[in-house]
């Protein structure tokens, strides 16, 4: 797989058959050209088959069809590795469920002129998460505050899965060595960027609740997210083991 445009959008999917076509439509309606890499975990609803068929007509659409273990983290890791292998100079990651609107991508890519990593942010002026119920909003705020405090991050939206990276930033993050199996990869990647002293900026986005399909977030994954944040911090504080 090789890319034609100067930016590659990586989209992990698990059972997003009803969302992926409208998402691709919105990506194609952008004023800029982007390549798209869908990383599907052999979705039982046939998302990967739909993408495979659409890719026959769209040379800027690519499918990474993963077999074996599912996991948002592993899919993200493999998507980033593939993006580097494909030669992408700028990499965007976003969810497939239309919570992340591609309309924000041009501003995020522009901001990569100034920053190494750009977060699509609900937590700065102009950003919003207005569409969600109070329970889910509270969970997001709590998880975000926990991550900010434990990892010592200054950014306002640590849990956003809508981000843009310069190629050099992704190389510094070193996706091959990412460990998170599930959605905690979002915090792991941000912490790597922070530890690598990359410049991290934020662009406001309007986050919209998923309308179609089923959320993959479970209590277990939420708890794993908190434990991952703690582990990342503890690993940093422990003296490095001598390799010899
Ligand atoms: N390839 C792959 N993609 C996944 C997996 N789990 C989730 N995804 C995708 O990752 C993105 C985020 O997942 P969501 O279920 O929307 O999780 P969320 O956004 O944290 O939760 P909601 O806000 O409730 O939707 C979506 O595009 C999913 O299809 C997985 O195991 N493998
Ligand atoms: Mg979602």
Image (spheres, grey):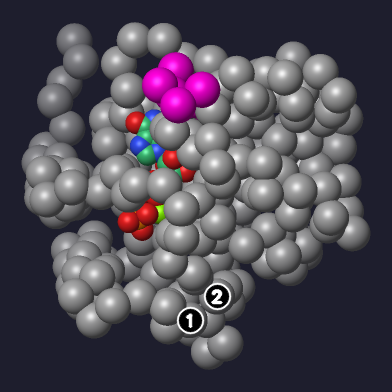
Q: Which residue is mark 1?
A: 128
Q: Could you tell me how far apart the alpha carbons at marks 2 and 1 are, in whole angstroms?
A: 5 Å
Residue 4 in sight: yes
Q: Residue at x 66, y 26 (%)?
A: 51
Q: Residue at x 55, y 75 (%)?
A: 206
Coordinates of residue 29 in the picture (x, y in percent): 84, 55
Residue 198 in sight: no
Q: Nearer the viewer, residue 22 or 153?
A: 22
Coordinates of residue 34 in the picture (x, y in percent): 80, 43
Decide if residue 105 is on the left or right side of residue 209.
right
Q: Nearer the viewer, residue 34 or 6?
A: 34
- Magenta span covers which residues? 39-46
Tell me the element at label 1. Answer: loop
Work out whether 53 lies above or below 89: above
Coordinates of residue 56 in the picture (x, y in percent): 81, 18
Decide if residue 202 is on the left or right side of residue 237.
right
Q: Is residue 40 magenta?
A: yes
Decide if residue 233 is on the left or right side of residue 44.
left
């Amino acid at each position: 797989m090789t890319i034609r445009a100067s930016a590659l959008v990586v989209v992990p999917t698990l059972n997003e058959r009803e969302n992926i076509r409208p998402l691709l439509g919105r990506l194609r309606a952008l004023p800029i050209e982007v390549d798209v890499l869908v990383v599907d975990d052999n979705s039982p609803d046939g998302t990967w088959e739909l993408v495979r068929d659409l890719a026959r007509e769209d040379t800027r659409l690519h499918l990474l069809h993963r077999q074996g273990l599912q996991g948002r983290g592993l899919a993200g890791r493999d998507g980033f590795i593939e993006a580097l292998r494909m030669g992408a100079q700028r990499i965007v990651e976003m969810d497939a469920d239309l919570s992340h609107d591609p309309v924000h991508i041009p501003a995020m890519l522009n901001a990569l002129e100034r920053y190494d990593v750009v977060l699509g942010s609900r937590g700065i002026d102009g950003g919003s998460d207005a569409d969600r119920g109070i329970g889910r909003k509270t969970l997001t705020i709590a998880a975000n505050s926990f991550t900010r405090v434990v990892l010592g991050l200054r950014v306002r939206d640590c849990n956003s899965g809508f981000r843009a990276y310069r190629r050099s930033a992704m190389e510094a993050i070193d996706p091959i060595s990412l460990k998170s199996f599930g959605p905690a990869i979002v915090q792991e990647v941000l912490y790597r960027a922070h530890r690598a002293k990359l410049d991290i900026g934020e662009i406001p986005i309007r986050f919209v609740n998923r309308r179609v399909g089923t959320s993959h977030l479970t209590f277990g994954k939420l708890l794993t997210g908190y434990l991952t944040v703690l582990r990342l911090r503890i690993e940093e504080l422990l003296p490095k083991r001598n390799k010899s």
